[in-house]
Image (cartoon, rainbow, N blue to C red):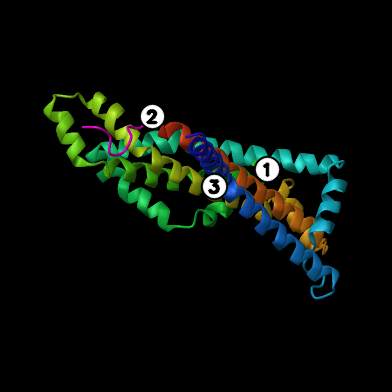
Amino acid sequence: MTASVMTSAGEQRKNARRARFAGQERLVVGTLSVGLFLAVWEIAVWSGAIDPMFVSSPSRIAAVALTMIDDRDFWRDVSVSTQEFLYGYLSAILVGVPLGLLVGWSRRLHYLLGPIIDMMNAVPRVTFLPILVLWFGIGIWSKFAVVFLGAVIPILISTYSGVRTNEARFLKVARSFSASRLKLFTSIILPGTVPFIFTGLKYASGRALLGVVVGELYAATAGIGHMIADAGNTFQTDVVFFGVFLFTLTGVTMTMILDRLERHFERWRAPAGGAS
């Protein structure tokens, strides 16, 4: 009896270790793959297989980063790009999510605005940049406008698509119990649209960053994109790659934040296949 209890306890400890490893497997494997990539990159540049004038190396990028941290102009560029991204992206969320819910919920509003949204989606928003610069100048507001336009359309489309794909059987059951339109919206439509909203937010964050980069490359006096353009013109490859790294880090961070928020809001939804 004692031996069987000890065996069972040992199996439980093994299962617990396996569960912990499974939970960390993605992090471990991802860290190893990134580390291997950086090591191969560094060795390729160090051995002379790649010319550092055209492709920098991780160590050189890190050295530039340490130097630029003490540069006041660098932090001014970071501040400008951050403002452009946050103002444009948050404004797109404040407009895109409510308007997407309304367009998806109202058939007439969908008929009215649907063609305009589809038309705007078909046109690359960065093509509006010259006219936006003409309207708002080369300051922060022209970049805010292109970031907003780039982000709001994916949020709109994803949100109203989520509303329109809610299962009709749930709506029929709710209507059979004389549920009001407000009750239908808050208990069925909105919870069922949450995954679509976050899909749109994730895609829109990438479009917003693209708007920042293109806007600052095209016409700007400050910002990380402006820093990259100046560095590229003077063959400062290390600075160029450092700027690219900053945009990459921002995109990855935004995705992680939105993933965490989505998991939080998933608890609000009724579990799939719940008890009848």
| 106 is within the stretch colored magenta | no
Vertical comparison of 4 with 38: above or below = above
Q: Which residue type carries mark 2?
A: Trp
Residue 22 marker: 3
Q: Residue at x 49, y 57 (%)?
A: 124
Can residue 52 be seen here? The reply is no
Residue marked by disc 1 = 81
3D distance between C-alphas at marks 1 and 2:
34 Å
- Crowding at label 1, few (<14), some or many (≥20) Cα neighbours within 10 Å? many
Is residue 271 shown in magenta?
yes
| Whole-percent x, y for residue 57 in the image | 80, 62
Quadrant of the snapshot with the C terminus: top left
Judge whether residue 148 can be spotted in this image.
yes
Q: Is residue 130 left or right of residue 236?
A: left
Amino acid type, residue under disc 1 in the picture: Ser
Q: Which residues are magenta?
A: 269-276
